[in-house]
Image (cartoon, rainbow, N blue to C red):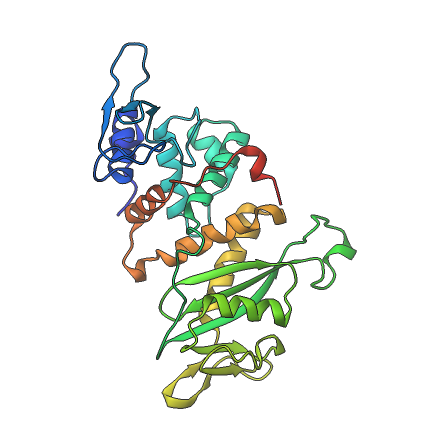
Amino acid sequence: MTLNLKDPIYNDESHARKHLEALQWPHGPVCPHCGVIDEATLLEGKSTRPGVYKCRPCQKPFSVTVGTVFERSKIPLTKWLLATELLTSSKKGISAHQIHRMLGVTYKTAWFMMHRIREAMAPAKGSEPPLGGAGKIVEADETYIGTADGKRGKKAWGGMGHKMKIVSLVERGGKVRSKRVKDATKLAIKDIIRDNVHPSSVLHTDGSGLYTNTGLVRIHEAVDHNKEYVRAGKAGRTVHTNTLEGFFSVFKRGMVGTYQHCGEQHLDRYLAEFDFRANTRTALGFDDAMRAQKVLEGINGKRLTYRRTNEA
């Protein structure tokens, strides 16, 4: 489904608010203070801003944005919804400068909006089941990007020591999960595999010693990239890490071509963005509208302040 800029949710605050309420409150208004469902009264006084409800049990006012990444924002909901649509439908991301020009907000505002939307893209901690399972293949690989200290001198860019380290896992034909690690050591990667891969899975990696003898999966098969990129494995399996290589290609093109620079304190949110789009790709049955809707359904309980945005 293509973006329809004439849709009222992008041009009328009332329509935008009702759209968000329908996604957040499918069974009626939910009080963020006491949790009671559908026991609130819409306040319609002349001095009351639109969309404010009052909970009858606890007598506290609230709106659909309270307790979400949109809380206390002065940006119209129409612009929030459009920014969400643009970010979710852009395969390699969309820069804050582009959002600043398209939405008519300041660059600082656009930058903060993008990070809040990325926060909504991230799954709640512990909410995702392990990747893989019996008869399923999980690929694991690591990559390096930029510099951890932001320096661009010749010394800082030499070797991998100064670069930010990322370990990604993908269930072949399924979802991607990426993690930032301080050091790409065998112990750190073993912890990631233990926490995120079902022990009945078949693990495919390159020939790196980082993945050998983990003892965490049923079968581990590797491909030596010094000789080949694909090989035949047992039981008719094709051994490779090409799925992750493709994901890393899109990620790096977005980070270098669209975003150009990323501080380490922001890397988790950028990873959440690229993971989200990979996990809601067309091959898994999603279109642009469904992708944006999924983000809007995930805004609750993820409030992000400007100060915390810049914390490592």
Q: Position of residue 289 (x, y in %)?
A: 29, 45
Outermost residue on the front side: it is 57
Outermost residue on the right side: it is 155
Q: Quadrant of residue 136?
A: bottom left
Q: Residue at x 39, y 33 (%)?
A: 80
Q: Quadrant of residue 172?
A: bottom left
Query: Would residue 261 be visible to someone looking at this image?
Result: no
198 left or right, relative to 46: right
Q: Residue at x 40, y 53 (%)?
A: 277
117 left or right, relative to 148: left
Q: Position of residue 199 (x, y in %)?
A: 43, 76
The answer to whether 265 is drawn above or below residue 139 in the figure is above
Q: How many marks?
A: 0
Q: Position of residue 221 (x, y in %)?
A: 49, 83
Query: Would residue 260 be visible to someone looking at this image?
Result: yes
Front residue (pair 18, 56)? 56
Front residue (pair 57, 7)? 57
